[in-house]
Every structure is written in C-alpha cells, then in structure tokens.
Amino acid sequence: MDLDSKVAVITGASRGIGRAIAEALSGQGMRVVLAARSSDLLEQVARTCVSEVATFPVDLREQDAPQRLIDFAVQRFGRVDLLVNNAGATKRGDFFELTEDDWHDGFALKFYGAVRCTRAAWPALMKSGGSIVNIVGIGGRTGSAEFAIGGAVNAAVLNFTKVMADRGVSDGVRVNAINPGPIRTDRLTVRIKRLAEEQGIPEEQAAGVMAEQMRVSRFGEPREVADVVVFLASSGASYCQGAVLDVDGGLTRTL
Ligand SMILES: NC(=O)c1ccc[n+]([C@@H]2O[C@H](COP(=O)([O-])OP(=O)(O)OC[C@H]3O[C@@H](n4cnc5c(N)ncnc54)[C@H](OP(=O)(O)O)[C@@H]3O)[C@@H](O)[C@H]2O)c1
C-alpha cells in the first residue's frame, strides 16, 4: 500500500470509526497522531496500534486547536502525509426542537474543524504530496427530517471536499471523501437502544427492524470504513481526486 512509515493525523480517533481508521493505518505501518477530547480513550487506542503513535487530547471546536494539532504532528514526526477529518457529532431530532446552539455546535466541530485542520495541514501535505480523506455521511446527499444539522454539515463538507480537490490539482494534494451509511458505533447503538425501548423488543431485534426500515441487509462495521480510508490513502487511489465513496451497504439509491 506504500504507506509504511508515512504519517497520518486522525481526528475523532478515540472510538468508533476513527479508532478503526487509526488501527488500520497503523497496521499498514503508518505512524499515527490520534486526536479527540478523551485522553484515556486515546491512550487505550494507542496501545492497540502496532506502529509509532502519538496522542493529542484536544477539543477541535476551539478555533486554534487544529493548528496546534498539526504543529504537534509536524514537531513529533517531521511530516504529515495524510489527514483524516473524521471527528463529528451533530445532534439529531425534530427540527423545531433543535436550538441555535445545537446548530453552532454541529458546524463548529465537523465543518469548521475540518476546514481548519485542512488549512493547517495543507503546507505539510503539499510538501509530502499527501492526501486528505473526509469522513462525511450519506445524510449530506439524502435529507431526512430527523437529521437537519447532520445533513447540512455533511453537505457542506462534501462541497468543501470538491473545493480542496480542485485546489489540490495544482498543489499536488489529493482530497477525497467517504460517506458512511449506518455503521455500528456508539451513535448507532444509542438509536437501536431507543427503538428497543420504544417497541419493547430486544436490542438485536430492534437492530433488525431498523436495518429493514433502511433497506440494508445489515449495519456496517467501523473496519469496513477504515479499509476504504487505507485504499484512498494509498497509491492504488492515485487518480482519485474529489471522489465521494458511499460505504453504506446500498442505502443510497440515488446517483
Ligand atoms: N456511525 C455512523 O453510522 C456514521 C454514519 C455516517 C457518518 N458518520 C460520521 O463518521 C464520523 C465518526 O462517527 P462515529 O460513529 O465513529 O462517531 P463516535 O463513535 O461518536 O466518535 C466520534 C469521535 O469524535 C470525537 N469527538 C467528539 N467531539 C469532539 C470534539 N469536540 N473535539 C475532538 N474530538 C471530538 C470523539 O471523541 P471524544 O468524545 O473523546 O472527543 C470520538 O473519537 C462522524 O463524523 C460521523 O458524522 C458516522
């Protein structure tokens, strides 16, 4: 995969999809910098990585946090070859119950966090001929009533992916995106538990009901997103620029 000894910065690496990405990239020999707020969880992930690893506990909603993260990565490893913008936590729910603060919070982390990490990492990525993978979400293309903030944020990140891919043509940086569908992480588990309680059925049955409603045969595993990140980061994807890959078990049925 040509990734050995290269350096990746992964946001939201303390659990879920970000954790799987960190472990998969580390498995390819990449040196990894893991960022999220929880230092304890980051340390746990670090222990499961098989290559050199550094953790950087940080709240990426803070304006100067992305620059500090990238400065740390460059200082620690001398280069950055890959930035994975994965951290995101947008509140679901009825549009009329979502507050101004919920909207600001959703954009602060996933959209502005990705914009600022990209700005901070770009010079190092130009130098290394590196790439960016944005972990976005199918809600960016298909709107749904319960996912107003996430949908808007994801649509914005998808457009931003295309913007930076265009810039990357002249600057020698590849920028691509992955749209995960329903992946079994804490976020999905919470929704399954809620459905199980509402319907008075066991959680596994609720998971089946939810999958059926979404018309997918099963939920995805974090590792199935991570494997696509490995591909997009590798020379195997050297002509992928501005690509948006759905990893959603067929949930998205539109073009
Ligand atoms: N799971 C899905 O079904 C699904 C579907 C579509 C898209 N996605 C997208 O995939 C990405 C990962 O999702 P996931 O399901 O793995 O989420 P998750 O399990 O909730 O993990 C989110 C990660 O982001 C970090 N994070 C949250 N707030 C942060 C902050 N303020 N500053 C820094 N890091 C922060 C969390 O760590 P700390 O709490 O320690 O900070 C954690 O590492 C998200 O962008 C999500 O929108 C997920």
Image: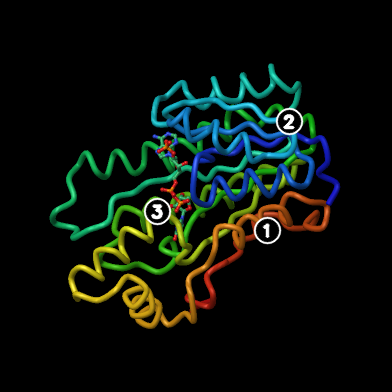
Alpha carbons under labels 3 and 1: distance apart: 19 Å
Closer to the eye: label 3 or 1 = 3
Tell whether label 1 touches label 3 (CB within 8 Å): no
The percent position of residue 199, horizontal first and vertical second, equals 19, 76
Q: Earlier in the sequence, mark 2 or mark 1?
A: 2
In the image: residue 186, left or right of residue 252: left
Structure colour scheme: rainbow
Mark 1 nearby-residue class (10 Å; few <14, some 14–19, many ≥20): some
Q: Return the mark for residue 52.
A: 2
Identify the amino acid type marked 2.
Answer: Glu
Task: Say what amino acid the circle numbered 1 marks.
Answer: Asp
Q: Which mark is residue 186?
A: 3
Q: Residue at x 78, y 29 (%)?
A: 127
Q: Quadrant of residue 208?
A: bottom left
Q: Is residue 209 left or right of residue 120?
A: left
Residue 10 position, x and y percent, is 59, 39
Q: SS for tag 1?
A: helix
Locate the C terminus by quadrant: bottom right
Residue that mark 1 sits on = 227
User: Residue at image x 45%, y 66%?
Assistant: 182
Is label 3 within 8 A of ligand 1 (CB to nearest ligand atom)? yes
Foreground of the two, 27 or 125: 27
Element at label 3: helix
Residue type of the residue flagged with mark 3: Asp
Q: Nearer the viewer, mark 2 or mark 1?
A: 2
**Residue 107 placement, left or right of 231:** left
